[in-house]
Amino acid sequence: MATAAIITTSDVLELSEPLLLDGGQRLEGVRIAYETYGTLSAARDNAILVCHATTGDQHVASPHPITGKPGWWDRMVGPGKPIDTGRFHVICANVLGGCMGSTGPASPAPDGQPYGMRFPVITIRDMVRAQVALLAELGIGRLYAVVGGSMGGMQALSMAADWPQLAERVLVIAATATMPAQNIAFQELGRQAVMADPDWQEGNYYGTGKAPDSGLAVARMAAHITYLSEASLTEKFGRRLQDRQAKSFGFDADFQIESYLRHQGLSFISRFDANSYLYITRAMSYFDLAEEHGGRLADAFAGTTARFCVVSFDTDWLYPTEQSRRLVHALSATGAAVSFVELSAPFGHDSFLLDVPALDRVVTGFLSR
Amino acid sequence: MSALRTDLAVIAGHVTSATRVLDVGCGDGTLLAALRDERGCNVHGMEIDPANVANCVEKGLSVIQGDADKDLAFYPDGAFDYAILSQTLQTTMRPDRVLEELLRVGRRAFVSFPNFAHWRVRLSLLWGGRMPVTRLLPVAWYETPNIHHMTVNDFRALVGERGIKVEQAWFLAGDKGTSPAAANFRAEHAVFLLSR
């Protein structure tokens, strides 16, 4: 059992300035829940911002307060680990629109009632605006690195494009600069599952004693499949039956994979707000860094002096290597210092969260100098 | 730079300090690290083998996993002062196109390759009647990555046809140099510095 990193701070900070969003709205009194690990150096030059994925949160290397499970990147962040909290001051914040303490659709609007669907539609760049504002409040003007996998990687890219002087190193794992149609399709499927649940009540389920749990669980089950690979499903579950010798000729979870997915769905609803899921996946669907910069991805990075490292996995069909390659070609075209590697790992998109020693080596190496 | 392979040492010894360098097929990044640490160059690499790319990243190098035949296309014209292709040209699908690309992205190019007309190779074919396995061509024909064998004279002819200028050339037998006139017979490998 790995030792958990020592949390230096677990706090919620209210931004002193309103956030001006891509959609045109002003969001006042934004609160950001965050954790820090390790000590900020006197020169303030060792801060690493870790950006979490769609359903992650600030508990990157501390036990989750609801599930009690280890932090989502406990294997990567901690003393002596690739993102070494003995050397770096690691910051991880719950994204804008999230449901673990940062302002989102479940938070009270100025009228005291939860925003629900009155919450403005946000973008990945809006999430980064909140991260940047948090860093400013914390007095951190420059990051040693910004690091993220999946949606976290998109935030890292968005930061590199629009705040080019902020991070000296940008580490992007299993992500994309432009959300492809297949991913938008799965995100829409998840949202429709939530919105088709009568308990969703047009988003006004807070305080009613009901929530779109079945819809959210189905959304999670579908999404979870996209995070895995055919090979890993076959190896882990195959056609094995769950606690029985024969098929039931009914609709119970006969197969282990069915039982596993149901469990994933159920455990997810205990820790996630359905409206947050809608808003966060919407932000991902909208993400197109090229479009934000006149249609040419290379122009997004015209101002960069950062060093980049882009990693993909050969079994990740949700954010396939081709997406990373497009990004790398755009970075190369700008003359940026960029590394790229496609690692071989069996776990599909989830490889970035799991035991892939080659990833540890790349992360350690990239952050070492 | 004594730890470098002979042809790499020649290249490293002739790269101007503080220039922008791309090493295509950079392997584990030995040359790039030397150019960075000893010449203050701004170094970039391309390498096809992911394990080697990981080794490079561990050294703090900027290296892209990519294929010389395809991925040079994404660099703008004149992006580098030097493009280096050491012992890689003979492994590409279209060496002529790779050479053109090299001189598009780099203002100058270093190219090194094993000479298939070296006397030992000739003897092996002439008397043995078998594809040669030598110190510089150590792998049997069926598993060698070298798919386009060439000689010093072949290479001279190609660059001549394409109007590419040979700024300098080094011909190596063992760790020693050999004369340009005898190179096609005596050189085990050759290093060319090219420009347009």
Image (tube, coloured by chain):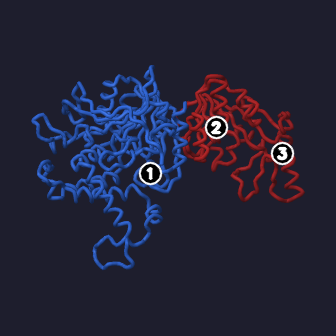
Q: Are marks 1 and 2 on the same chain?
A: no
Callout 1: residue from which chain? A
Question: Which residue is label 3 attached to?
Answer: B118
- Give the quarter of the image for residue A53: top left
**Are discs 2 and 3 less than 8 Å apart at CB?**
no
Q: Secondary structure at mark 2?
A: loop
Question: On the image, numbered disc 1 is attached to which residue?
Answer: A320
Asked which secondary structure carries label 3, the reply is loop
The percent position of residue B86, horizontal first and vertical second, equals 69, 39
* Same chain shared by disc 2 and disc 3: yes
Q: In the drawing, does residue A245 fall left or right of residue A270?
A: right
Hue of chain B? red
Q: Which residue is mark 2?
A: B29
Q: Residue at x 27, y 38 (%)?
A: A96
Q: Which chain is blue?
A: A
**B94 vs A51, nearest the viewer:** A51
| Contact, mark 1 vs mark 2 (Cβ under 8 Å) | no
